[in-house]
Image (spheres, grey):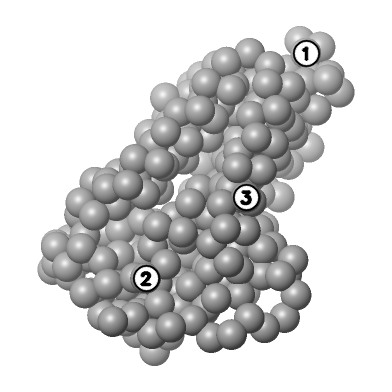
Amino acid sequence: MSTPPPPHQGPRVGAFVRALRPHQWIKNAFVLAPLVFAGPTLRAEGHLTQTLILHVLLGVAAFCLQSSATYLLNDIHDVEADRRHPVKRFRPIAAGELPVRAAWSGFWGMLAAAAVLSWLAGGLFIAYVGAYFVMNTAYSKGLKHIAWVDAAVISLGFVLRILAGAEVAHVHLSHWLVACTVLLALFLALGKRKHELLTSDTSHRVALMRYRQAHLNVALPLLAWATAGVYLGYTLDPDTADRFGTQHLPWTVPFPLLGLWRFAKLLDDAETPLSPTERMLRDPIFVANLACWAIVVSLLIYGVVGSA
C-alpha cells in the first residue's frame, strides 16, 4: 500500500508551476539549433528575417508547453509509483499538493496551447509536435517499462526537436548533427538509468529492474566517444567549413569532451538521488563549459573570428 499524500499545503498555483517543470524547458533549445547553425547562411541569403525568428521562437514555446503537458500526463499515470520514490514523492501530484483533476485540466490546457502555437509556427511544424505527443503518450502508456526502448524514445524526442526546428527555419539539417543528437541523447538517458540503479529502489520501475550496471558501464563510454567522434566529424566536414567560412571549428571539440566527462562524473555520485540531468544544469563546471562552448562557436560561425 502506498503512503497517502500529505494534506494540501501552499498555493495551488505554485504547485502547478512546479509540476510543469519549467527548468526542463532548456531541452527545447534543440529546436533553436538548426537556426543558430544556419544563421550565417540565412543572413547571407537575406532569409534571416524577424518573421522567421518569431516563428522559430513560437516553435520553441510550443515544445515547452507540449513537454509540460507530457510531464503532467506522466505524473498522473505514475502517481502511486512516485510516492514510493525517494525524490519523486515530492512532486506536486504525488505529494498531494496538486489534485489529479487540476492536473488533467492543466494537461488539456497545455496541449491546446501547444497546438495553437504549432499552427502559428507554420509549415509541417505541427506534425512534428503531434508526433512528439503521440510518442510520449505511448511512452507513458507502456514503452517506459521496456528497458533500453525507454532510452531510445527519449533520444527520438530530441531528434524530433531538431527536425521541427529545421522545418520551421526552412534549413537543411546536417546528418552529422542528427547523429550527434541521437548519440548524446542516448548517453544522457542511459546515464540517468545508471544513476537510478545506484541510488534508488529498482522495484518502483519495471524497466529499471531489467537494466544491468555492467552493461551500462560498457555502453556509456562507447556512446561518449561516439558522440565526440561524430561532433569532430561534423567540424571537419568540408561542407561545414564552407557553410561557416572557417576552418577553426575542430578547436571546439575539447568543450564537448569536457562536458561528457563531467556528466559521467556526476553519474558516479551515489550520495544524492537527484537526477544527474538536473544536477548538470546546476553544476558550475558543466555550465561554465557549456557557456564557453556556445560563445566560441558563435564567434566562429558568425564571422567574428576569421578563417585564416
Does the image show residue 159? no
- Among the two numbered marks 3 and 1 on one chain, the one whose residue lies closer to the N terminus: 1
Residue appearing at x 63%, y 81% in the figure? 8
Q: Nearer the viewer, mark 2 or mark 1?
A: 2
Q: Amino acid at mark 1?
A: His
- Among the two numbered marks 2 and 1 on one chain, the one whose residue lies closer to the N terminus: 1
- The spot of residue 140 in percent (x, y) is 36, 49
**Dot label at residue 105:** 3
State left or right for residue 73 relative to residue 21: left
Tell me the CA gap for discs 2 and 3: 20 Å
Nearest to the observer: residue 174 or residue 109: 109
Residue at far top of view: 45
- Among the two numbered marks 2 and 3 on one chain, the one whose residue lies closer to the N terminus: 2
From the image, tell me which residue sits under label 1: 47
Residue appearing at x 50%, y 28% in the figure? 130
- The spot of residue 119 in percent (x, y) is 68, 21
From the image, tell me which residue sits under label 2: 80
Nearest to the observer: residue 10 or residue 271: 10
Examine the rendered structure and indicate whether residue 108 appears above or below residue 16.
Answer: above
Q: Nearer the viewer, mark 3 or mark 1?
A: 3
Residue 138, located in which quarter of the rendered image?
top left
